[in-house]
Each structure stands twice: as C-alpha cells, then as structure tokens.
Image (tube, helix red, strand yellow):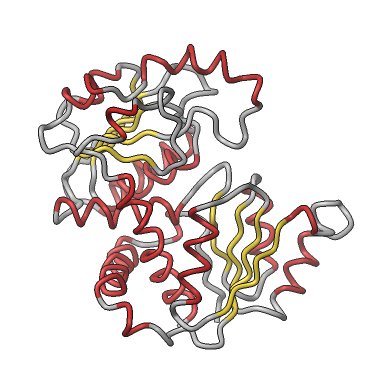
Amino acid sequence: MKTRHLLSIADLSKGEIIKLLKLAAAVKKHPKEYHRALYEKVLLTFFQMPSLRTEVSFDVAMFTMGGEVVDYHSETSPWAKGKESIEDVAKVISRYVDAVMVRMHDHKDLLKLAKNCSVPVINGLTSYEHPCQVLSDMQTIQEKFGKLSGLRLAYFGDGLNNVTHSLLLACAILGMHISVACPAGRDYMPDPKVVKQAKQLARKYNKASIQIEVIHDPIKAAKDADIVYTDSWMSYRIPPEEKPKRMKIFKPFQVTPRIMHKARKHAVFMHDLPGLRGMEVTSSVMDSKQSIIYDQAENRLHMEKAILLHLLR
C-alpha cells in the first residue's frame, strides 16, 4: 500500500478535508475518547527553523493520544552539515519511527525526503506551503460561521508566502472566495503556478463560480470580506536587511481598523502568528473583539491530532 503523506493542501480531496474537519471537531469536543488512540506510536519532529506553535502542538497532540515524540533539530544533524544525503536520512528514520513531521526551508527537500520515506511525512512548514496551519484555520472559520462554502476571505500583505499558497488551495477546494491584496511584482505576488492550480481545483470541486483574484487595492479586497487575514512581512526566508524596504512597500497593505471597517460587520481577523504589531497589523486590530488569532492557535492542536489519526490509523 502506498504511504500517505501530507505535503500540500492539494494532497487532500474535498471529501478528505471535510473528514479531517469533522474529526478535529470530535477530538476537540471529546479528547478523552482519543487518549490512547496512538498508543506506542512514535513521531519524529525535525526542525530546520524556529518554532513555537508547531513544535508544542505536535508534541502535545502525540502525548495526549498516548504516543511519543522525538524532537530533532537540524543543527545537530549530519544532513544539515552536508555529511549525509536526504535519501539516506529518510531510509534510516523510516526504520525507527511511525511518522515524521518536518519544518524546513526548501519544499523540494521535503518532497525528496517523502519520496524516500516509507512512513508518513507531514509538512510542518516550508517556504512554499503550510498545510497544517491552514487546515486548522478552516476549522476555526467553520466554528465561527457554521460553514465554509460561499464565504469570502481577503488576505493582505506578502503574497509570495507559504500561508498564502495554502489558503489559495484550501479556499478553492472548499468553495470559498479569496482575494490576495499585495504589492505588484513577482517578489510579492503568489506563485502563478499556485494561482493556476487553485483555479483548476475550484472548477473541479465546486459547481458555483469561485472568485480567486490577486489585486493591488487593499480597500477593494476588504469590501464584503467575511475573513481578513494577514501574515508576517518578514518570513524566515527573508534576509533581515530587507526589512526597511519591505516595510515601505507593504505599508499600504497593513491591516488597520479602517480595513476592518470596510469588511462585513461580522468579519473576523486572522493571523497565523507570530505577529509583529505595528507592521502587518495594528495592535488595536489584534486585540479587538473581531480577532480570533488565539482560537486559530488552539486549533492547531486539534487539527494536528486529526491529521495524525488520519495518517497513522
């Protein structure tokens, strides 16, 4: 039987995402029923980048379902020092553990690792996609609105971003309209291949027409939005010396009370965190009643439990 991985939102069908959402809701509501669901299963978590939510949530997810975790950071790895190939690493760790969660820069390295692993590999973040985050975002949105299909999500800021890419794919599959408001230029706009893939997925899974657009007018993007979403202007891939330039370029796309006022009255604000107050979003928005950022963070735990159950049972 072919090993199942979660490397991209597009690895999942609409039916599989809906099943994951139902399972995550069940795990959240009745955690005790799953306290031995992964008894004696071992997850290796491999980190090439700093982490708070990803590391802690996956650790807690395994521990509270009876499993074990081995945390491994790349600075101590022969792979990171160029002394061992990704292929050899994959084949060795497959002999030790039941699944691997990887947080790394290069998506191509992730694909190479998964190709050579005989156990499930989970994308905990690459510079290209962040599927665990966005699946938990969909859970959070469904909790707030009681549905997903037909809602309108407006994303502001860095379009060439892992979260943006995963949001485009998830919204397309689940029948949500999405507007990405970002500066013009290939360094700031979503990868055209992802936009094309999202439009193909929208046509495949939805009878009604789904709007998927990349625009450069933040006010237009905010109009009639149910969800206003942003992310850091300084992703891990961005050199620190780029900060002054990017602050100037992205300033018109900062989420402010004015932007929230242009959205629908019931609109919520989302951010996958960490958030830099005064950069991509003002403190007044982050701390407002419309903000659901901590619900998002909590749901990482419940959705990751569902993902682990999906791949390991």
The picture places residue 126, in percent across and down from the top left corner, at: 58, 47
Q: Nearer the viewer, residue 28 or 189?
A: 28
Q: Quadrant of residue 68?
A: bottom right
Relative to residue 167, is residue 304 depicted above or below?
Answer: below
Tell me the quadrant of the picture where the N terminus can be found: bottom right
Picture residue at 27% right of the left edge, 78% below the top = 30
Is residue 309 or residue 232 the one in the foreground? 232
- State whether residue 304 is above or below residue 82: below
| Residue most extreme to the left | 265
Q: Residue furthest right?
A: 83
Residue 237 in the image: above or below residue 15 = above
Residue 77, how many percent across, how many down? 80, 59
Q: Quadrant of the C terminus?
A: bottom left
In the rendered structure, the answer to whether residue 4 lies left or right of residue 79 reads left
- In depth, the one of 153 and 287 nearer the eye is 287
Q: Residue at x 56, y 83 (%)?
A: 41
Residue 140 at what x, y percent from top left?
A: 27, 54
| For residue 141, side relative to residue 214 (left or right) | left
Left or right, 184 with reference to 199: right
Q: Residue at x 29, y 31 (%)?
A: 179
| Residue 102, picture quadrant | bottom right
Q: Position of residue 293 (x, y in %)?
A: 32, 45
Give the tally of numbered discs: 0
The quarter holding residue 26 reads bottom left
Compare residues 123 and 170 and report the one nearer the observer: 123
